[in-house]
Amino acid sequence: MGITAIIVGIMAIGGGVIYVIVQQDALDGLDDFVVSVPTETVRAWTQPPARPTATAVSVPTVELIEGVPPEVVHYEFDFAALYPANQTNPRFWANPLFAGTGPFGGPTIPDGFEFVSNLAAFRGNDVSDEAKTIRIPSIDLIAPVAELIILQEDSGARYEQPINLVGHIPETPNPGQLGNGWYFGHLESPILGEGNIFNRLPEVVEMIKNDPVDVIIETDREAFLYRVTGANVIPKEELALYRTDTATVTLVASFPSRVYSHRLLITAELIAARLES
């Protein structure tokens, strides 16, 4: 009995030491997940591309008649058709001859969407439907969205946990509306089994260092496309919902893995919409 207790004690101490090492290693890397996309890049990512054209002058091969000047024909070349923005990574818009899709980029906006200004976003009852689905194509995420309810407990009121879905804070704006909509999901939930909807969300941080990443939030009738503009990590005790003057969303997950002492925040701003006709 005594030997068993000693062995169990040694295992407990060893497990504790391993956890401390893992925890410290995870916390040491938190600064890598704080990224702010430069203003110039955000502007390029969130505005419709210009449609460049150029005029070329060509003299057709004809039989010249003495004393008669040759006919000069002007041809209009549409570079936007040769290098369509909806098939070109935004980083190459300024240099279409070197265009490529890049590893995470892709269309400027999907078919059926139209660019909108996030400063003149939809107001009042123009769009008031609740979010139903969230998609982040770059990390193959498609997940249901539901409104979180407030639970009254002895320790006070709190929002319910999102279980196998993304939870929207109902007091914050709906998709397409001005202000900051807040969406919560689990990075992982190995003990409680509440899902891991945002398991790949940290990958977005590295992606936006080079390419645009889109978050598409759909209602029953419309869809709204937000482009990620930054990421942050804060202690969970410091998390507070904040407002914005533009149409934005913030995605939140517990972080880092196996520690969960912080919250990863991914922010994105509205750039396009697909509205019910």
Image (cartoon, grey):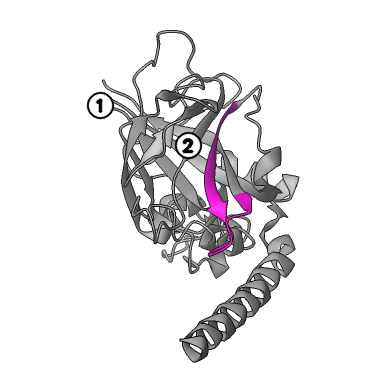
Quarter placement of the N terminus: bottom left
Answer whether residue 230 is magenta in the image.
Answer: no
Of residues 56 and 47, the one nearer the viewer is 47
Q: Is residue 251 left or right of residue 21?
A: left
Residue 78 can be seen in this image:
no
Residue 63 can be seen in this image:
yes
Of residues 41 and 209, the one nearer the viewer is 209
Label 2 amino acid?
A: Tyr
Residue 56 x, y percent position in the rendering = 55, 55
State if disc 1 and disc 2 touch (CB < 8 Å).
no
Kindly give the residue lying farthest to the front in the view shown: 1
Q: Is residue 195 left or right of residue 119?
A: left
Quarter placement of the C terminus: top left
Label 1 amino acid?
A: Asp
In the image, what residue occupies the spot 47% across and 37% down? Answer: 183
Res. 183 mark? 2
Residue range corresponding to the magenta coloring: 247-263
Res. 93 mark? none
Dot 2 or dot 1, earlier in sequence: 2
Residue 11 x, y percent position in the rendering = 54, 83
Look at the picture and state if 104 lies above or below 141: below
Q: Is residue 87 left or right of residue 25?
A: left
Q: Quadrant of residue 22?
A: bottom right
Q: CA distance from mark 2 to mark 1?
A: 18 Å
Residue 209 x, y percent position in the rendering = 64, 61
Res. 220 mark? 1
In the image, what residue occupies the spot 31% across and 37% down? Answer: 112
